[in-house]
Image (cartoon, coloured by chain):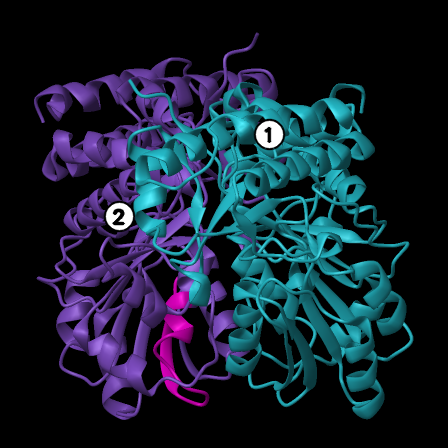
Chain colours: A cyan, B purple
Amino acid sequence: MIKKYVMTPGPTPISEEVLLEHARPLMHHRSPEFSKIFVEVTDKLKRLLQTKNDVFILTSSGTGAMEASIVNFFSRDDAVLVVNIGNFGERFKKMTLKYGLEVFSLDYEWGDTAEPGDIKKILDENPGIKGVILQFSETSTGALNDVETIASIVKNYPAIFIVDAISGLGASDLRTDEWNLDVVIGGSQKALSAPTGIAFISVSDKAWKLNEKSDIPRFYFDLATARNYLHKTPPQSPWTPGISIIVSMNKALDLLLEEGLEKVFNRHRVMALATRKAAEKLGLELLVKDRDKRGFSVTSIIVPEGIDARELTKIMRVKYGVTIAGGQGKLSGKIIRIGHLGYFGMFDVIIAISALEMTLKEIGFQFEIGSGIAEAEKTFMENNYLDS
Amino acid sequence: MIKKYVMTPGPTPISEEVLLEHARPLMHHRSPEFSKIFVEVTDKLKRLLQTKNDVFILTSSGTGAMEASIVNFFSRDDAVLVVNIGNFGERFKKMTLKYGLEVFSLDYEWGDTAEPGDIKKILDENPGIKGVILQFSETSTGALNDVETIASIVKNYPAIFIVDAISGLGASDLRTDEWNLDVVIGGSQKALSAPTGIAFISVSDKAWKLNEKSDIPRFYFDLATARNYLHKTPPQSPWTPGISIIVSMNKALDLLLEEGLEKVFNRHRVMALATRKAAEKLGLELLVKDRDKRGFSVTSIIVPEGIDARELTKIMRVKYGVTIAGGQGKLSGKIIRIGHLGYFGMFDVIIAISALEMTLKEIGFQFEIGSGIAEAEKTFMENNYLDS
């Protein structure tokens, strides 16, 4: 009967209201009642992405949408620039290489973000580059790329700008049309706090022009097929979609849009700030050194010398019922990650910090017990969390 | 408050027990508790597929697994034989052509099934063929290929045998290992009667040997990657899976395996028989002429001259709350399809026939009202449905 809390950067906790929608008997995916929901979800995703571009719902994990963002727009041997600030940047690198693209890779330390000037330099030196590809929030580190500034550069080049916003969307402002983002990817299981299994992708006119020339073979993730079905009357998806997830996303999007995007972003900002101030108060070091490079979805904390990261997360999970994430790839065993993305409120941060405090004490780390919580409480009060 | 019944060949009705599992708060996909379920579901799928081969769970619709069955085993310009008896055969044809394969196409009338001798002839004449690809049950017609006989032929050639069993698995006996089926595909939303959004695929040693030489680029559906993750301790899926669907599949598989596969197959056989005898009693003609070619998942009925198929299905859906399927592709408007696949019992057949009778009467079709139901009841009683 130990009460359980999932505090990872995805899957994120699902509200009772969304779970109830998820549990409804399935409607048929070609029925008028599902078509209505399909249209509603598509329209609400456009509001979340701040775009008038078509948004396509894919039945896959986010990695499937990453694949769709590559195979629909490029041809074999096309040059692309992959901006790599962590594990998911690495995934884009592997994927673009698999598909036979010529890959320029701009690699940063994990925990750092991209320097817009570096991207401009590579685009100036290599005018043939057809796409710039990066993460908005890099889930493996919690760093947040300055997509607005980078977009203001890329838009002046022939390259399209592909943004994996899976874990950043909803936690930080992302303006697809205003910033000229050509392809933007999101997932059901992050800020939406709906179940895992659905991804979505928006496509600009500039990207559709590249699509016409693209020769990479594709079928399941073919977005021109998805566009044909989306523009049917009534709009549909080409293949049987994850019906129950889409139905639950409809409610999840209502909750987000009723709260209002400004308030949603501020909620995430203050929760992230409280988590970080608490961790620092405990004497812990954050992975992302520069405050301005920290996103609001997840907080990566360096595990102090002499402490076993796996033991720490295991005690938190088994004894306290609090699941947080460890490090991925080369940060495995070196950091812990606390998610505060989606259906989270200030007391979830209090729970995470409280479980962390008790676990660290048990392991023998030296700090004043309760001091992290005090710092989090002060942060919430000073930042008018409730008035936001 | 009109009570609703979905009687299509997928999505199929979900039992309350499975829906409750589906509605559970999500566990993290890298947590020990989910790993346990992931292993259980994988093992139960192996029992359903009657195989010792690895079975991979994919977060996608069945079409994604069809794509996986192509891109993992062939190379550009490889020759394959697509056996086409309906809409999903057409899909395999389009897909293999998209991926640059040399496609031998063996096309039959929709409603017919493949002649094993035809396949043998093509394999004899074209020894370079690397794969034979077909549907077990063709969902668009309800015809069932004689996979056992065809497999006994294909196993003597270098070609691998790829079977799309999405809508046939669980309704009819399919013995992956005993029959030497190299690649078998299934989906969550058919006989399992779990929600849509998960597909699965088994792979034989013969198929893995082709995989080593395959040069079609792939990432999301790469089965060698999936194998690496499946053989980790604990077993995992490479990308974030559709967690809630997999959890519900665990319960759905329990229900199927507790009933016992023999009983499950018999239940489907008798429901199919009752539906068909009732339809014929009403004076309707079945699409699949030859009894021995009829599968047990779905019954395709030719819409009589002068009756508008769309009006018929619309009245059934709107007035009676009973959703059945229309025709696909070139059978659109020409047939109706009643699904009796998955969580269905005899009274579901009674409901479908009853709604069909009342709708046909309303439209002006001539027959003795109640006669279809009487025929269905007799069929259930004569076939010892309850003792099965």
Residue drawn at (46%, 87%), measured in percent from left and top? B76
Residue drawn at the location 63% of the way across and 73% of the way down: A108
Kindly tell me whether residue B315 is visible in this rendering: no
- The answer to whether marks 2 and 1 sit on the same chain is no
Q: The numbered mark 2 sits on a residue in which chain?
A: B
Residue sitting at the far top = B1
Q: Is residue B321 above or below residue A82?
A: above
As displayed, is residue A388 above or below residue B292?
A: above
Which residue is pictured at 76% across the width and 26% down the height?
A382
Image x and y of residue B310, in percent:
62, 35
| Residue under numbered circle 1 | A343
Q: CA distance from mark 2 to mark 1?
A: 38 Å
Q: Which numbered disc covers residue B169?
A: 2
Amino acid found under the numbered disc labelled 2: Leu
The front one of A162 and B255 is A162
| Residue placed most toward the observer, B62 or B364 | B62
For residue A46, what is the image quadrant? top right
